[in-house]
Amino acid sequence: MPPCPPEIHPERKHHHVETTGFTLTDLTKVYSTKHRDVVALDNVSLSVPRGSFTVLLGPSGCGKSTILRMLADLEAPSSGGATIHGESPEAIRKAHRLGLALQDPSLLPWRSVRDNIRLPGQVMRRPVPKERVDELIRMVGLEGFQDARPAQLSGGMRQRVAIARAIVTEPEILLMDEPFGALDEITRQRMNEELQRLWAASNATALLVTHSISEAAFLADRVIVMSPRPGRIVGDVTIDFPRPRGRDLLTTPEFHRVCDQLSTLLHAGHDDGADLGGDGGLPATADAGAAE
Ligand SMILES: Nc1ncnc2c1ncn2[C@@H]1O[C@H](COP(=O)(O)OP(=O)(O)O)[C@@H](O)[C@H]1O
Ligand SMILES: [Mg+2]
C-alpha cells in the first residue's frame, strides 16, 4: 500500500514554534530499595518548544523511562518538577490530553484492530467518529486488517495499532517509550517514517525514548543524550534536516556526521565515571560533575 503524502502542519513549515512544550526543572528521582538508594535522575532540567519532536537517547538504566513516566504522571519526582504546555502532568493526564505508546503494545486481545483504536475515546466517553478511526487505520497502513485480532498481526502491525490508539484522541503530547525496540531494522525504519508523518499532521509535542542512534537522528528536532548512574543529560543536539525526511537521508554524509556526534556523546557519558557493568548504585566517586 503506498504511503499517504505527508501533510506538514503549516506552523511546522515555518518553524514558528514559540510556546513551551514540556519542561523538566531540577528533576531528581531516587528509588529507595532495601539495600541502597538508586539515583535514577540527578537534577535534570530541559525545556522544549510546543509541537517539537524530542528524543531521549541513552543506554539502558540512564533514567529515560523515569522521565517519561513522570511526564505521564505515572510516577512522582523525588524533587523538582515537570510541566506540559504550562500545566501539571496530572492535569494533562486527567483531561486525557496525553497519548502514550510503550514497547509492549498491550492491546486487548479479544478486541479487533478497530475496537482497540476506538478504546481511548470510549474511556473518555467521547466516542471517536468511525471516519477518524478508519482514516487512522489507513494512515498506519492497516487497511484490510480492521477486523483482525492482535494475535493475527505481526509485531510491527501491533505497534502500528498502539501508535494509532495513542493519537486517536489527538493528544497534545505524545510520549513514546521505545515503541519500535522489538522490531527488525527494515520495519523499524518504515515505522519511523510513518510516525514522522502522523506527528507532522498533528499539533502534538512528541517525546520518544530510544537507545538507537539512527532512530534518534532520523526523527528528532532535538536529541537529548543521557548517561547513567546517576541519570543526567550529557548532550543536547539540534537536528535540522528538512522535513519530511525520507530514507534517502540515512545514506548521506550529513546524517552520518550527526550519528557520529551522538555516538561520541554517548561514549563520553560512559567514560565519565559511569560503569556499564554496575547495577545502578550510587557512583563510587563524590565528583559527580554538573550536567550541562
Ligand atoms: N521501580 C524502581 N525501583 C528501583 N529502581 C528502579 C525502578 N525503576 C527504575 N529503577 C532504576 O532507575 C534507573 C533508571 O531506570 P529507567 O528510567 O528505567 O532507565 P532507562 O529507561 O533509561 O533504561 C535504573 O538504574 C533502574 O534500575
Ligand atoms: Mg526504559
Image: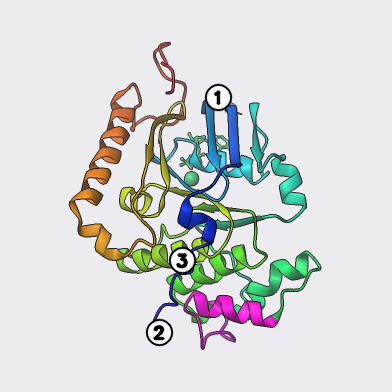
| Distance (Cα) linking label 3 and label 1 | 46 Å
In the picture, measured across the screen, residue 50 lies left or right of residue 279, that is: right
Q: Give the SS element for disc 1.
A: loop
- For the residue pair 171 and 180, the one nearer the viewer reads as 171
Kind of residue sitting beneath label 3: Arg
Q: Residue at x 58, y 79 (%)?
A: 135
Rendered image: mark on residue 35: 1
State which quarter of the image contains the C terminus. Answer: top left
Mark 3 or mark 1, earlier in chain: 1
Q: Tell me if residue 112 can be seen.
A: no
Magenta part of the protein: which range?
Answer: 130-150
Mark 2 and mark 3 in contact? Answer it, CB < 8 Å: no
Q: Residue at x 33, y 52 (%)?
A: 241
Q: Give the SS element for disc 3.
A: helix
Mark 1 and mark 2 in contact? Answer it, CB < 8 Å: no
Rendered image: mark on residue 1: 2
User: Residue 182 is drawn in which quadrant?
Assistant: bottom left
State which quarter of the image contains the N terminus. Answer: bottom left
Q: Position of residue 121 (x, y in %)?
A: 73, 69
Q: Position of residue 2 (x, y in %)?
A: 39, 82
Q: Which residue is mark 3?
A: 197
Task: Name above or below for residue 14 compared with residue 286.
Answer: below
